[in-house]
Image (spheres, coloured by chain):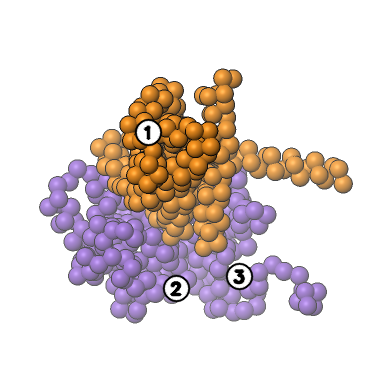
Amino acid sequence: MIVEWIAGIGSLTLSQLSNVGRASLILIQAIVGRTNAGVHWRLTIDQIYVVGVLSLSIIIVSGLFIGMVLGLQGYTILTDYGSEQALGQMVALSLTRELGPVVTALLFAGRAGSALTAEIGLMKATEQLASLEMIGIDPLRRVVAPRFWAGVISLPILSLIFVSIGCLGGALIGVSWLGVDSGSFWANMQASVEFSDDILNGIIKSVVFAVVVTWIAVYQGYDLVPTSEGISRATTKTVVHASLAVLCLDFFLTAVMFGEI
Amino acid sequence: MEIREVVFRRDQRVIYDGLTASIPRGKITAIVGPSGTGKTTLLRLISGQLNPEAGDICVDGLSVPLLTRVELFDLRRRMGMLFQSGALFTELSVFENVAFPLRVHTDLDEELIRFVVMMKLEAVGLRGALDLTPSELSGGMQRRVALARAIVLDPEMIMYDEPFVGQDPIGLGVLLSLVKRLNQALGLTSLVVSHDLQETLSIADHVIMIANTRVAFEGSPQDMQLSEDLLVQQFLYGRPDGPVHFHFPASPIEDAL
């Protein structure tokens, strides 16, 4: 019984390590090696439109509502301590340090990550990837690499947009609706948000999340079993694994950046 | 092209157990055999999409399993392959699908690309469909477009995986003639995997029959017709009983029920 249990853990560990190894190999082969820079850049721009620009609406709407909720909740709590003037500071720091990078990454995994997995998976199922190989084109360079770089470039920009819109949402509720002084709101925000400590760390978090989420998405698409069930499972895995990875990494990054470890 | 003592399995199922065959340059070689014996797998091994567990596959003096990724892609530029499903790029039009290899691998100007693509589409009878997308074509037409794409770079070697499936008698006749003419005009080495036995044998110079994990017959179509081997006879005349098992390996039905 115990031996079987240990064997099960061993087998699971080996399988997970093998997945990580395969995913690393796919990523390295995709982004390292000879390439036609002009074509590669054009393909990446196309993908930035697909994964980045087309994700804008969900990011803007979510950012606005999360900023509004922060404004409302923050006002209710801060009023108890007579500190509602610090609402701008609270909204901005919450968004730049945590909610901006994390929520954008989670939304990105759900919207663009799953789409990337499904698209690459369908190309595999319909032998389009094999067909590229037979034409003498490496699908990792042609299909995977542009999508990977598009994700890495798009997510931090989406995160900055999310934070900006969130701040406006907070101001809309705090200043326009609940009557917090506009000067205090914006002045406190300006005084408390440091570029290097807050904005830069938020961007670093976003870049890390972008690499992880896009990597998981392209790997799941490239490595899936090419059937309808395989595509469905891989798409689900992308969202679940990417979301968990973002939340775990966020803890460690926060500990390093703000926890004075 | 030499295939030597190749061993290959999918999970626990042995597909090849010491498969040895040779494919002559500049000829049409038909690869035939019962369903599930690994005919398409052989094409994938030759093109390096799969790697054998043991044995060697030599193409033009190069050992395919030992090639680096870059060397393999260089070799594939000299090959063409027609996939069973066609495998056209769904977001591109018929014209762009055929033009794709030219755009990637050559510096031809747009006018010349258009000329070459039109010639290839004319050869497969689909010049009039150049603006359609693959989803607007029937399965047989998709395979004809895929054939035009496979030959657009004038490869030295071409592999056809079930090229005649879904073709009406007219399309079938045209394709048979096209495969034969391409082979003669360009001196291609052609490999044709097909279940349309009589049609394939009518254009083939060389036949490799795969059954029960090995090469069951290798020689000319005429020798195959004259062969008294029970396995060859069973396959040629479609007999249900014989050395080739119709049923996938399983326990007796009495045990299963």
Give the vertical position of A157 relative to B3 (above or below): above
- Chain letter for mark 2, please: B
Residue B36 image offset from top left, x and y in percent = 57, 65
**Mark 3 crowd level (few <14, some 14–19, many ≥20, 10 Å Cα):** many
- Tag nearer the camera, 2 or 3: 2
Residue at the spot 42% in from the left edge and 32% down from the top edge: A85
Chain identifier, purple in the render: B
Measure the alpha-carbon separation of dots 1 and 2.
78 Å
In front here: B122 or A164?
A164
**Left or right placement of residue A25 versus residue B88 in this view:** right
In front here: A139 or A209?
A209
Residue at the spot 36% in from the left edge and 31% down from the top edge: A184
Label annotation for residue B196: 2
Chain A colour is: orange
Rendering quarter of residue A186: top left
**Left or right placement of residue A12 versus residue A190 in this view:** right
Residue at the spot 53% in from the left edge and 37% down from the top edge: A80
Query: Which residue has dot 1 on it?
Result: A185
Amino acid beneath label 1 = Phe
- Tag nearer the camera, 1 or 2: 1
Number of numbered markers? 3
Q: Is residue A148 visible?
A: no
- Chain letter for mark 1, please: A
In front here: B252 or A189?
A189
Query: Which residue has dot 3 on it?
Result: B231
- Secondary structure beneath disc 3? helix
